[in-house]
Amino acid sequence: MATIRKRGDKWQVQVRRQGHPLLTRSFNQKADAVAWARQTETKLDKDGLVADPSAIKRLTISDLVKRYLEEVVPRKRGAAVETIILRAFLRTSLADTSLSNATAQGFARYRDERLQKVKASTVRREFAILSHCFETARKEWSLPIPVNPLRAVTLPRNPLPRDRRLNQDDPDKLDVALGKTRVWWLGPLVTLAVETGMRRGELVSMRWCDVDLIARTVYLPMTKNGLPRTVPLTPKAIETLEAIRPMPMRPRETPKTADRVFPVTTNAVRLAWGRLRERAGLSDLHLHDLRHEAVSRFFEYGLTVPEVALISGHRDPRMLSRYTHLKAESVAEKLAGVAG
């Protein structure tokens, strides 16, 4: 219940409720004190939550991020990456700022510092996660944060989309480098990336129980856009999968990962790919470029936009425009065929 008493020239309100901290506010007018007491008690009765105005002075951005890591991140598809990003942020001085002093200016300075070390796309991703952290605190945790400071921060523009494709010598360089690696799964993974256009996370999460070599498909129950999809397999993809069908127990495999086509983590793939491309002398080639190569090849094979979207998982066909960097030689051959 609420207690209202005159203290000096102000009216002090105290709201006590079992299981909740004592809430106290002071007002110049008794009517305001009564109104706040009723509003607070109503909110407690309704959902058990109440915005403690002193919370943003006691709590820091670090406290916010830690709770977000514990309660929200584990439910997200990109949990592993977001955990790395947020833990890195916790090591910054900005994380120790109290919520009452969290401003757009402070995050703008942090943005500029980050841009000295990482790319614009990385900063945009980090700020999107932090912004959602603040929105969650305001809307779901009833923290009295008046505004999300990150909404007022101007983010750097994304660079132009990459259009890197494999040139004539790249496959041979990769083959030579793959011949020198002892990582048994790297070669098959690279081949499937080019043959299917699947993302790194999709390749890593692929399970044998979802591979149907008779129907020539692989089912992906969870993808980046949140929807499952079935990917048709090329003859070379089928040949690759048949070559690595489950053996009694492959190196470093555990019962937990036994059904996975590639029983490794996305980070292991990132590290292995980094070593491979350096050994091949292709430091500018990203693993995601193989997806770009695959989708571009699908168009060169004559597949329609809906057919390519079925394979790649793009929900908006317009997004495929950035992948249709067809090779001029291929178009010239098609024109020659028409002219002939």
Image (cartoon, rainbow, N blue to C red):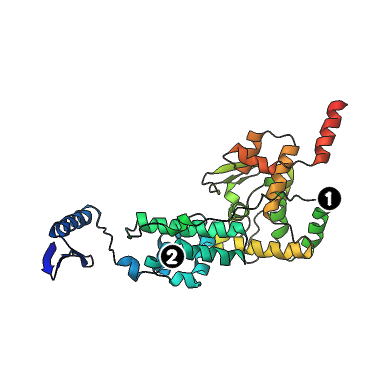
Give the class, few, some or many, for how many residues have Cα within 10 Å of label 2's Cα (few <14, many ≥20): many
Tell me the residue that label 2 is attached to.
Answer: 65
Distance between the alpha carbons at the discs numbered 1 and 2: 47 Å
Give the quarter of the image for residue 255: bottom right
Tell which of 103 and 327 is nearer to you.
103
The quadrant in which residue 74 appears is bottom left
Find disc 1 in the rendering and name its residue: 168
What residue is shown at x 63% (from left), y 57% (from top)? 262
Quadrant placement of the C terminus: top right
User: Would residue 81 appear left or right of 141 to someone viewing this image?
Assistant: right
Is 302 drawn above or below residue 132 in the view shown? above
For residue 86, which numbered disc appears in the image?
none
Please state which of residues 282 and 29 is positioned toward the viewer in this rendering: 29
Residue 268: give x, y in percent of width and height: 63, 64
Residue at 46% over, 69% down? 95
175 in relation to 333, above or below: below
Query: Is 228 placed above or below 61 here?
Result: above
Q: Is residue 291 left or right of residue 143?
A: right
Sequence-wise, the earlier of marks 1 and 2 is 2
